Image (tube, grey):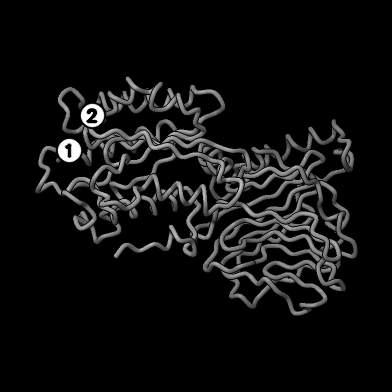
């Protein structure tokens, strides 16, 4: 009923308004002009030919392309929907995935009109819904109901002449009459609308809807506008002593963002303001110096290891401090995004004064759920990835991660923020 209500409201609005960049809204359809709703697993050679429906999309200058899918491999290019001129070598409108990134391409006889990939990646084997909307104001990529990338370009199907082939799972041109860029994985739906879907409609059509903060983080990672990242916490975030001269998790993350994501992300700055011995009390008191001073767009907070052993900071105070810190981050100018990271588990045989650390990690999870904050849950991940036990070999002194432990923290953070690429030096790094 929710979806019908949304679409009915959109239809009422369409009857009353017109736009200057395309058809009158009154002439637009409410539902999709092309809608293929057959869940199928594609094996890298299979495809679905929708060429009989190509006339429905051929002349669109504005609208929405939407697809729900999940990947089972990481290929250089995989087609969700390819609409092309089969008599030319490079004339198509393409929505697909490239190495896990969402890609949208418009080419006319070899001339590239649009070709952009997200930096965020979606080859995690989970179902995702992607959409690309094109209006007279520009092009926006959406993932799981959230905008993640905006371009000034306004090219759509009408920019390509001779469109006669439409396929799910492959693209066809004169040099590849049997197809190229075949898809591997599941595709549940592919649709084209002759209008720009609203945010509410996109969320109603998505198999999952990301947290608003997750969408904002993806937008920051995909944007070419420089961003400052503050990563704060205690000695673990600081990376003091126990990294043995290797990079801390914050430094690995910096390398992934500032170098490996390419220009102009190298003008992002990652600032580590972790302080040895710090608690949430300390960060609340020093928030202007440790966070505000750096004009951040993102603030990551990993604290709790010292709170649990500090008299006067019980779980109630810890919770209140976390809420206060999240509120303080959100109150900063520019829509700053908070990220919470649970501390890694410790060797309780050596650190018996941290026996309640798991309870503090659970408190952070509760705050993240209640406040809609992105959570990187190291405390759960470490034992889950090691047969249910705390991997003490990743700890220098039973509490502080060593160089291997910091790399493990970094890989989890990078993966959870959807910029993990197994081909990158950071993501493929193994410390002997």
Is residue 226 or residue 191 the one in the foreground? 226
Q: In this rendering, is residue 191 above or below 144?
A: below
**Sequence-wise first label, 1 or 2:** 2
Q: Is residue 52 left or right of residue 150?
A: right
The picture quadrant where one finds residue 291 is: top left
Percent x, y of residue 364: 32, 35
Which disc is residue 315 wearing?
2
Q: Callout 1 environment at 10 Å: few (<14), some (14 to 19), or many (20+)? A: some
Q: Residue furthest front?
A: 245
Q: Is residue 394 left or right of residue 258?
A: left
Is residue 414 or residue 288 the one in the foreground? 288
Q: Is residue 389 left or right of residue 101?
A: left
- What is the quadrant of the N terminus in the image? top right
Which disc is residue 356 wearing?
1
Q: In this rendering, is residue 249 above or below 373?
A: below
- Asked if the residue at tag 2 contacts the one at tag 1, i.e. Cβ–Cβ closer than 8 Å, the answer is yes
Q: CA distance from mark 1 to mark 2?
A: 9 Å
Tell me what residue is drawn at x 66 percent, y 57 percent.
103
Element carrying mark 1: loop
The picture quadrant where one finds residue 58 is: bottom right
Percent x, y of residue 135: 79, 42
Percent x, y of residue 325: 38, 26
Q: Is residue 105 left or right of residue 88?
A: left
Count of all numbered marks drawn on residues in the image: 2
- What is the quadrant of the C terminus in the image? bottom left
Tell me what residue is drawn at x 42 percent, y 31 percent.
371
Element carrying mark 2: helix
Percent x, y of residue 336: 51, 30
């Amino acid at each position: 009923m929710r979806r019908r209500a949304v679409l009915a409201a959109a239809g009422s609005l369409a009857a009353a308004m017109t736009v200057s960049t395309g058809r009158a809204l009154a002439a637009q359809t409410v539902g999709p002009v092309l809608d293929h709703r057959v869940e199928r697993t594609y094996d890298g050679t299979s495809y679905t030919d929708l060429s009989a429906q190509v006339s429905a999309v051929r002349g669109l200058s504005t609208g929405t392309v939407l697809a729900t899918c999940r990947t089972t491999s990481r290929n250089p290019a995989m087609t969700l929907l390819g609409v092309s001129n089969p008599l030319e070598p490079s004339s198509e409108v393409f929505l697909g995935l490239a190495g896990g990134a969402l890609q949208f391409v418009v080419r006319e006889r070899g001339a590239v009109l649009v070709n952009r990939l997200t930096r965020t990646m979606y080859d995690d084997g989970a179902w995702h819904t992607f959409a690309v909307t094109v209006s007279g104001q520009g092009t926006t990529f959406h993932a799981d109901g959230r905008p993640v990338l905006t371009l000034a370009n306004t090219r759509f199907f009408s920019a390509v002449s001779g469109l006669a082939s439409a396929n799910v799972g492959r693209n066809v041109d004169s040099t590849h009459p049997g197809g190229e860029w075949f898809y591997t994985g599941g595709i549940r739906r592919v649709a084209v609308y002759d209008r720009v879907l609203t945010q509410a409609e996109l969320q109603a059509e998505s198999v999952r809807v990301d947290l608003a903060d997750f969408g904002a983080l993806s937008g920051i990672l995909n944007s070419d506008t420089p961003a400052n990242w503050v990563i704060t916490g205690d000695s673990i975030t600081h990376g003091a002593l126990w990294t043995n001269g290797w990079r801390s998790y914050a430094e690995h993350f910096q390398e992934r963002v500032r170098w490996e994501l390419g220009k102009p992300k190298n003008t992002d700055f990652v600032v580590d303001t972790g302080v040895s011995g710090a608690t949430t009390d300390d960060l609340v008191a020093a928030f202007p110096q440790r966070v505000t001073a750096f004009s951040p767009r993102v603030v990551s907070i990993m604290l709790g290891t010292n709170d649990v052993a500090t008299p006067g900071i019980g779980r109630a105070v810890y919770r209140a401090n976390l809420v206060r810190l999240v509120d303080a981050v959100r109150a900063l100018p520019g829509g700053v995004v908070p990220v919470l990271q649970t501390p890694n588990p410790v060797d309780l045989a050596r650190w018996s004064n941290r026996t309640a650390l798991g309870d503090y990690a659970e408190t952070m999870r509760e705050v993240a759920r209640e406040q809609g904050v992105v959570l990187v849950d190291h405390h759960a991940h470490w034992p889950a990835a090691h047969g249910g036990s705390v991997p003490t070999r990743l700890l220098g002194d039973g509490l502080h991660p060593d160089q291997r432990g910091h790399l493990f923290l970094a890989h989890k953070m990078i993966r959870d923020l959807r910029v993990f690429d197994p081909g990158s030096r950071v993501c493929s790094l193994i410390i002997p």
